Amino acid sequence: MGDGGGHRATRIPRRGALPLVSLVIVGRGDWQLAHSRVASIVDECVRLRVEIVLARPAASPDADMLARTFPAATVVEAAPDASLGELRAVGMREVSGDVVMFLNDSDALDTAWLAALTRQAERESPASSEVAASQLAGPR
């Protein structure tokens, strides 16, 4: 869990690599809802190599259960009374992605948007531009 000390990391895209996409899912509510929402997208996130960060209040009894159930996800805890905005900030401190998406665990999730956003991030990355330029140049 982050210390909330106000330290800001500088994020620099990894030149020559496809961007890492991170998904931060925040929630303060029902653990069954959080579980069902994460379960509905975790396989697609793994397939697309999307980093998953789940941000929950420290008082949530579901944090340990979510960590055990979804080992592909990183579970981080905030103050017990953290607002959704504070949960997003805690999640943001933990991601390593070049592109970060945020969801509330109460949002109905459809994996089609995840694939579309991941494809768009790859198209706009320096790595895809370098590959396209080398293909246009042809054999040397």
Image (tube, rainbow, N blue to C red):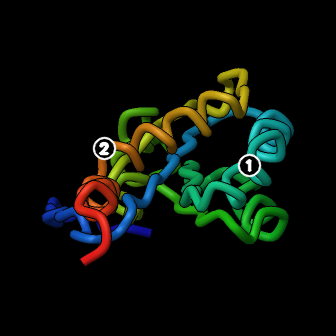
Amino acid at the residue labelled 2: Glu
Quadrant the N terminus occupies: bottom left
Crowding at mark 1 (Cα within 10 Å: few <14, some 14-19, many 20+): some
In-front residue for pair 42/28: 42
Instruction: Say which residue label 2 marks.
Output: 124
Taking the spot 76% from the left edge, 59% from the top edge, the residue there is: 66
* Residue 44 disc label: 1
Taking the spot 34% from the left edge, 69% from the top edge, the residue there is: 17
In-front residue for pair 126/45: 126
Mark 1 or mark 2, which has the lower sequence index?
A: 1
Outermost residue, bottom direction? 140
Classify mark 1: helix, strand or loop: helix
Taking the spot 50% from the left edge, 47% from the top edge, the residue there is: 24
In-front residue for pair 69/129: 129
Amino acid at the residue labelled 1: Glu
In-front residue for pair 68/109: 109
Residue 107, image x, y percentages: 65, 23
Q: Quadrant of residue 48?
A: bottom right
Residue 86, image x, y percentages: 37, 41
